[in-house]
Image (tube, rainbow, N blue to C red):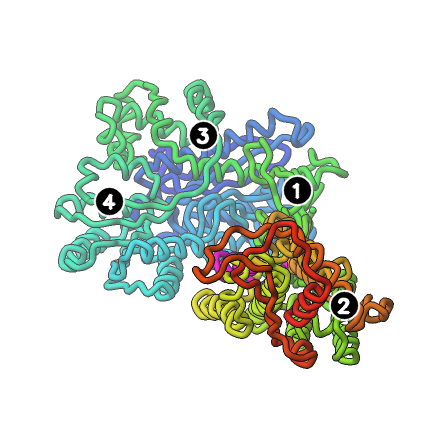
Amino acid sequence: MAFVSFLIPCFVIGTDIAFSCQNTDDFVGASSPGDIVIGGLFAVHSEMLHPEEHFIKPVIQNCAGFEIQIFLQTLAMIHAIEMINNSTLLSGVTLGYEIYDTCAEVTKAMASALRFLAKFNSSNDVVEFKCNYSDYIPRIKAVTGASYSEVSMAVSRLLALQLIPQVSPASSAEILSDKIRFPSFFRTIPSDFHQTRAMAHLICESGWNWIGVIATDDDNGRFALESFGVQAMANNVCIAFKEMLPAYLSDNTFHTKVDHAVEKIVKETKVNVIVVFMRQFHVLKLFKKAIERNVNKTWIASDNWSAAVKISTIPNIRQLGTIVGFGFKSGDVSTFQDFLRNLHEKPTDNNKFLHEYIMLLSVCAHLEYHDFQTCISNHSQDDLLQNVENNHQIWRDDFLNANIEPGFIHSTILAVYAIAHAIKGQCKDRNCKDPSAFAPWQKVQSTCSQHCRPGQMKKVTESPHTCCYECVYCPENHYSNQTDMDYCYRCNNKTYWAPVNSTTCYRKTIHFLAWTDWFAIFLLLLSAFGVVLVLSISVIFTKNLNTPVVKASGGLTVCYIILFSHFLIFLSTVFFIDEPTEFKCKTRQALFGISFALCISCILIKSLKILLAFSFDPKLRNFLKCMYKPIPTVVACTGIQVIICTFWLIFRTPFVKQNFSIPRAIILECNEGSIVAFGIMLGYIAALAFVCFIFAFKGRKLPENYNEAKFITFGMLIYFIAWIVFIPVYATTFGKYLPAVEIIVVLISNYGILCCTFLPKCYIIIYKQETNTKSAFLKMVYTYSSKSAGSVAVSQFSLDSKSSSSRATISDSCKSEKNSANGNCHFQVPEQRLIKGEVLPKNTARTVARKRLSSI
């Protein structure tokens, strides 16, 4: 295959100017030899001079406007290369550099890129045209730069021809992230997308919605403006006007358009916020003109000029108003500051930028700080040539340190180190002292750290370079799903979780006391057994309806009501199990509370009746007669609980709550709505139980075979013990077994009262049938009444004037056995004096026994 080649011509300006291009080597701004050479592109000057011959001859012109900040970036690149060469990073392989001045123009940058593409070790600066550059070894291995996005776009298209890596420390245009159009472009700063989004968010959060925008009329300014427009629209921010200034200071319309932009700002009196996407020297010209017109606004600065010293030191800069800026993340630049302090000791033969800076110092040394800065920026290379013989060299290292912008310096050093680590990876298994050992396009996994896998994130170590890091696992509830992620994403909301070292989030498991849980099954079996027990007792009492034990228990109606309430209490435990719903949360406590109140109310009436039947104290009997109103008492006591539950359900009703206290699960539980209402409901039941306990305790010394009051006392004690233990356990328990705690205490108290109330009677009915007869009960009560009546001491009563003293008599109000059986008899002690110690006659004791039996 025949190959066509072409030469880069030698551009000649004139033989009398030292800065003119005699040959292509004169085109280099700073250089140093090395085994591997890295190129550099920096806009050390802000504009190119365009004499008339520029339009008739293809020559590269001299530049003007020395930029201190960009000059410092070239020094940062040199400093980083020197540090690498003095370290063990590349194991004896040295880096060289060739740094070119783009003069902030694409034309001159393209010429430099052609130099980079020239074939290595060729006698001429030849760029060969080939169909395949796989075996082509160019002059350099990688490029650092350029300073501006528009220049980087143009240069990257040329470098992409041979896939030469380009790492920019300052070009932030979002379009450069497109790997299809710019396959070999990289950068050490974020794209404008993040900056424009932050700007729009800041403006929105500050309550501004009517703003102006000024940008340079180049690719960078247009892309930034487009990105910001999208973000502004998304945040409901309106742009009142957009002003575009020429990208090049050499443009004849530049000053006219600056004046027009300032005039626009002055006229738009309602626009108080201006967003500026421009280069530093553009902003400098704009602000000087704005200060002259007494413009006072809020200025939103892009990262390109937000930290510029030349801007912040403009005389009367504070008159402009408030400036809010976004900048790059910076690192430790102390070693670079030390490098600058010793810069005057370095030779200038291979660094024309440093030589020019020293000449500028000689010309401008007599001026104050800001005038000194202006002087340096305004002199062209031709001016220096005319004055160099009349000035002696001086050094001012304080000026360089004062103009450091840490963000740009740090990103430049990172760019060089990124290239160095890539070279290190290529040199692991080859001799890199031979520049032809590898081509720029060849890839390696080249890093100072291993790639972080999904589930991990980067953790920057003590190294000053963000490329060097450790891989750490994502913490709990965080995940990463790509390699080399800087941070882990947090799971979206409380319903998802992630374990340590996770690549995705998982939906949290829903926990509740399910039907299939072994503990729930056990509790349900206990409840079911309780229901069976209630039904069995009902059958036994129904079959023995006319026996004294059943009649003495208050009759079948009262027994059925008590047993029904026990049934409802057992039933209420079902609502504590399985997935909570609004209906279950509202039903379970109300059903339990009302049922328990009904049960205790009926037992309270029984306690009153027993105490009334066996009391010998007239005052106590009168009190008990007043209290003993069965139906109103049960209705009233139960009705109060109904009212409590109704108010609870209306005003602070229980509801379903998601508990996120357990990291990997969501506990569905019923929130009681009001702990106070819950406490009042339980407290009311406790109050009823306490009154019942007092009355039952008073009648605990009944006949041995009829000691129902004693068993009621035991039942109430079991209730109290269960609920006293429940309170601290309930308060300290959480999780899906919290409902089980309440089920347990409900079952214990319910079983306790049920068994103490009915099982002794069932035992007598089944196993002591000989005592469950009328005659046996009469005999038992007769014996008890004889002993009790004979030992009672009665206080003195006033006697009627016609009566002297008489024996104590007992009036029999029961006229028949039928009345006795129906429970219509009432035992009465006449208002006559009983002689202490006198024993009742047998027939009288027998009568009392019948009345005791009938009244209970």
Q: CA distance from mark 2 to mark 3?
A: 127 Å
Q: Position of residue 404 (x, y in %)?
A: 38, 32
* Side (left or right) of 745 relative to 45: right
Residue 329 vs 162, above or below: the answer is: above
User: Which mark is on residue 777?
Assistant: 2
Mark 2 secondary-structure assignment: helix
Q: Is residue 209 above or below residue 557?
A: above
Counting residues from the start of the chain, the first of labels 2 and 1 encountered is 1
Between circles 2 and 1, the one closer to the viewer is 2
Say which residue appears at 64% left-offset and 70% top-offset. Answer: 855
Look at label 3 and name its amino acid: Asn
Query: Which image quadrant for residue 780?
Result: bottom right
Q: Is residue 770 left or right of residue 355?
A: right
Q: Is residue 258 visible?
A: yes
Q: Residues within 10 Å of mark 3 (few under 14, many from 20)?
A: some
For badge 1, the amino acid type reads: Cys
Tag 3 residue? 351
Q: How far apart are the alpha carbons under marks 1 and 4?
A: 42 Å
Q: Secondary structure at mark 1?
A: strand
Query: What residue did someone put label 1 on?
Result: 471
- Residue at 61% from the left image edge and 61% from the top image edge: 611
Secondary structure type for disc 3: loop
Residue 636 percent across, percent down from the top left = 49, 70
Q: Residues within 10 Å of mark 2 (few under 14, many from 20)?
A: many
**Residue on which the image places disc 4:** 322
> Hey, what amino acid is under mark 2?
Phe
Residue 832 falls inside the magenta stretch: no
Mark 2 or 4, closer to the camera: 2
Name the secondary structure under disc 4: strand
Residue segment shown in magenta: 665-688
Pointer 2 or 4: first along the chain: 4
Real-space Cα distance between discs 3 and 4? Answer: 40 Å
